[in-house]
Image: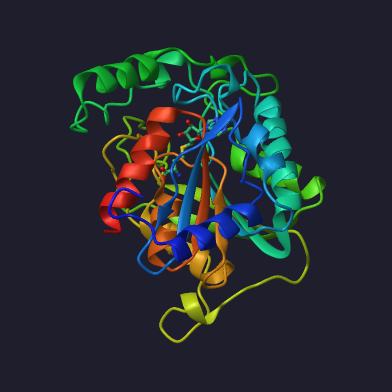
Amino acid sequence: MGRRAMSQTERTRLWRERARHGLVGRTRAGFELLPPITLPAGNTITIIVGDCRDVLPTLGRASIDATVTSPPYFALRDYGGGPKAIGLQPTVAGYAAHLVDVFRLVRPVLRDTGTAWLNLGDCFCTAPPGNAPNTTALSSGLPNSIANQEMRRAAQVLVDKTKLAGLKPKDLIGIPWEVAFALRDDGWYLRSEVIYSKPNPTPESTRDRPTLSHEQVFLLTKSPRYYWDAAAIRERNRNRCSVWTIPKQIVRGHSAVFPEALVERCILAGCPPGDTVLDPFGGIGTVGLVAGRLGRNAVLIELNRSYAELARQRIEDQTR
Ligand SMILES: C[S@@+](CC[C@H](N)C(=O)[O-])C[C@H]1O[C@@H](n2cnc3c(N)ncnc32)[C@H](O)[C@@H]1O
């Protein structure tokens, strides 16, 4: 807990909550449960360090009410997760197949009335120098050793995208839609494409196309009917529209975090109060942070232990 000792009642409630998610007695080789965070309102945030494909099958069936996630971009960054990391597959089809696998594992743990929000960004068939080193880490205020590691990893050539089969150099790949169609083929209902529009995009040196300033957020469901609270995200007397203009957020410690305002809309519309949100690619915990503030529980899975620990710290600090 960190901030104060837990009462017996809290312990019992926490145990029940963990049992509901199939987590009691599950700390074993392959993944690890960090000490759970209980917020003043009584909701809990559980962070698990491991490959989401190992962890998801251990969660309780139908124990999750909504999934909100942003997997690593295709071939853009190495988040230091080692060989089990998703995102560094050499082909678009391979990347999409890995995400379909993950979502196949999400399906049994998600309630039949649950929603799954998937944020994905696109990229171009550029030569390796197009993988511009990400400099967020340098200005992040992180200890030098961590910042240096981030920079080194970001500067590595990941995948030569000009060699991708069926694509020409300079082509826009269309990754979000590749993945969305693969998930729809796998049985998910593809209910909406939300455009997450960034008024503060990363500047690009390109002179022959518009600057890329949006990403997709797909709303997927298990069933044709699902929990949906339209009133919770209504805008100026009308139903919420599908273009969401939200500034991207820079947060110390991770180069690709969700803006909190985006996560907030997904949770408010797609997860009943008091219920549980899952992020299988937890990063530094934005989904847990927002879920906690909104009175929901959260289960976060993250491969890189340093990020998982930062997530725990961030949630502890910001919900005190
Ligand atoms: C785009 S980041 C998510 C950031 C998160 N939305 C946030 O706001 O902090 C994707 C994360 O997925 C993690 N990851 C990659 N492969 C994974 C896997 N197989 N299982 C769990 N996490 C994984 C990476 O370490 C990275 O932190």
Is residue 182 shown to the viewer in this render?
Answer: yes
Q: Is residue 10 left or right of residue 223?
A: left
- The x and y percentages for residue 43 are 46, 64
Q: Quadrant of residue 226?
A: bottom right
Q: Residue drawn at (52%, 63%), measured in percent from left and top?
A: 13
Residue closest to the eye, 49 or 180: 49
Residue closest to the eye, 181 or 286: 286
- The x and y percentages for residue 251 are 28, 43
- The x and y percentages for residue 193 are 60, 57
Please, which residue is most extreme toward the front here? Answer: 8
Is residue 245 shown to the viewer in this render?
Answer: no
Q: Quadrant of residue 111?
A: bottom right
Residue closest to the eye, 308 or 15: 15
Residue 45's place in the image compared with 268, above or below, is above
Q: Residue drawn at (45%, 87%), measured in percent from left and top?
A: 237
Q: Quadrant where the C terminus lies?
A: bottom left
Q: Residue drawn at (29%, 55%), measured in percent from left and top?
A: 4
Residue closest to the eye, 13 or 22: 13
Q: Residue drawn at (49%, 21%), measured in percent from left and top?
A: 126
Q: Is residue 81 left or right of residue 173?
A: left
